[in-house]
Amino acid sequence: MRLTDYEKAMLDGAHGKAKARAMDLLVRYGEALGAERLIETNNVAGAFNASTPSVRALAARGFDAVYSELNLDSDEVVEVPRMAVNTCQLITGIDNAKWRIQGIPDDLAEQQKRGEAFFGQRGINMHATCTPYQVGNVPVKGEHCAWMESSAVVYCNSVLGARTNTEGKESAGAAALTGRIPDWGLHLDSNRRGTHLVEVGIPVDDMMDWGLLGYWLGELVQDEIPVLTGALVNPTLIKLKHFGAAASSSGGVEMYHLPGTTPEAASVEQAFGGHQIADTLRYGATERRRAYENLNCARERKIDFVMLGCPHNSIDQIWLIASLLEGRRISPNTALWVHTPRALRDTAQRNGYVRMIEDAGGVVMSDTCPAISRHLPKGVRTVATDSAKQAHYLPAITGVEAWFGSVRDCIEAALSGTWNGTL
Amino acid sequence: MQDVMPRTLVLRGRRVVGGCAEGEALVTRQTISGWGGINERDGTIIERRHELRGQSFAGRVLVFPGAKGSSGWSAYFHMTRLNGVAPAAMIFTRMTTKVALGAVVTRAPAVTDLDQDPFAVIETGDWVKVDADRGVVEVTKR
């Protein structure tokens, strides 16, 4: 890889040990990719928190040790300086206010708070959400970013037209200290063009529809770039948030184009940019049913737990949930957790929505989700969720069975304690 | 004494992470999720509909198309190394940032861009030697 004089100086230790270790990792990573150089970034979203039991032993040696091992892949413990560029924390494993309801041990919650104090002082902004674009980190078109979180990466590239590959804990940690990331993949114009044409033959309207479409599509195209045409009804933030999250769970979609909607595709022709169409896929009622059946692995209709908000809910989603619960009580045998970024929870509180959900027996959480925390209410065997991503991952991670359906299906399940959702 | 000499094949490709290692092959044509797809404490695949579900790659040469899913891919393979259950080596066909970074932090020898289709040549149970520095993969059929 060709490095600039400044990058060489960082690698040689002229700017301190931490930046030297960061550059070492970036060079190893860049060479593994076959990248020719690094590119400057001023927008990093990573995972720096110390919220899992597996980090306990490292955290006992201090947070320099945590960052050195997990965010720099460095055998040597280096002192962590202030982040060189704008950096934020993505989702964590612990809700700082509701950790007891999650079932998190006290010492782990304390460890998380000590970690936040350490990293916060060093410039890691504690958005603590999988959706930084909902709480003020909205990169502009063409901005080079170094983001983790597959659902945020696909949103960043596709909806915002900013540029990021799917970074990991170590590369985001190195980028935050150096302002550099390999110039590879989606940072380059020619890699952002469509590869597959997707003809959607049935109306795709509500959030559930978009989740099913994404779940079907990701499995087929893996990390290729689909261009979608057809009856894609009113693609808003919440629908695209769900669509991208589903497609980057069943597969590895990091970018897509909706001609006429997303910023790099005024037309189908522009989306492909002269590249040949590798394949044309058709989505109809059969494909929709297949996605639904693949997601719904549960047999038991008695619902112990309803989880809403993966990726984290927007304020209008919180309102929808609150309005469906108004004046009603959820089943005594069912827990309802609703997840939203901390900043939006504050808004929801001021609006009175949190109170409406709590009056019905639900909990409004922030900072985390069950898949990340691996904590569900005690004894849960069967879960209902409106998130294709959560329905995909929760059974593998926690051993529960999952039902996937619409927000209304899930609220009905919380109220009755029974799953009656349908396709 | 063996009736038949083991058949040995050689593939050549590009180094992703240097070093030499050998072990029994574990082959899948399906991409693998890191976070949410593997158990980092014992190296098993946990994804519900994955063909390798329940099998462990610990100490084996993992032959797979590449990565999918969460950005926690590298972090979880990183932890398999810290927990002593990482693959001995990796051979993959589809380069992404997830798999590149994951291979780097797993510090297991890794190669890609092979001159033959590894899925046509390597089967689970074959003995595979990966000399990533030279980009050479030696396969002894079981």
Image (cartoon, coloured by chain):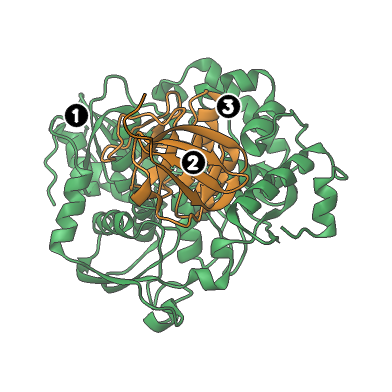
Chain colours: A green, B orange
Q: Residue A199: where, in percent of width, then height?
A: 25, 72
Question: Which amino acid is tagged 1?
Answer: Ser
Asked if the residue under mark 2 is in contact with the one under mark 3, i.e. CB atoms within 8 Å, the reply is: no
* Precedes in sequence: disc 3 or disc 1: 3
Of all chains, the one bearing label 2 is B
Q: Which residue is mark 2?
A: B90
Q: Residue A403: where, in percent of width, then height?
A: 20, 40
Residue A126, quarter of the rendered image? top right
Characterize the local packing of mark 1: few (<14), some (14-19) or many (20 or more) Cα atoms within 10 angstroms.
some
Q: Which residue is mark 1?
A: A331
Q: Residue A107: where, in percent of width, then height?
A: 55, 16
Front residue of this view, candidates A234 and A153: A153
Of all chains, the one bearing label 3 is A
Residue B125, quarter of the rendered image? top left
Question: Which circle, 3 or 1, is nearer the viewer?
Answer: 3
> In the figure, is residue B7 to the left or right of A51?
left
Q: Which residue is mark 3?
A: A112
Of all chains, the one bearing label 1 is A
Q: Is residue A385 above or below residue A303?
A: below
Question: Which amino acid is tagged 3?
Answer: Gln
Question: Which circle, 3 or 2, is nearer the viewer?
Answer: 2
The mark tally for this picture is 3
Q: Residue at x 14, y 34 (%)?
A: A416
Q: Is residue B36 above or below residue A103?
A: below
Q: Secondary structure at mark 3?
A: helix
Question: Which circle, 2 or 1, is nearer the viewer?
Answer: 2
Dot 2 and dot 1 within a common chain: no
Characterize the local packing of mark 2: few (<14), some (14-19) or many (20 or more) Cα atoms within 10 angstroms.
many
Q: Secondary structure at mark 2?
A: strand
How far, Cα to Cα, is label 2 from label 1? 49 Å
Q: Residue at x 59, y 38 (%)?
A: B105
Dot 3 and dot 2 within a common chain: no
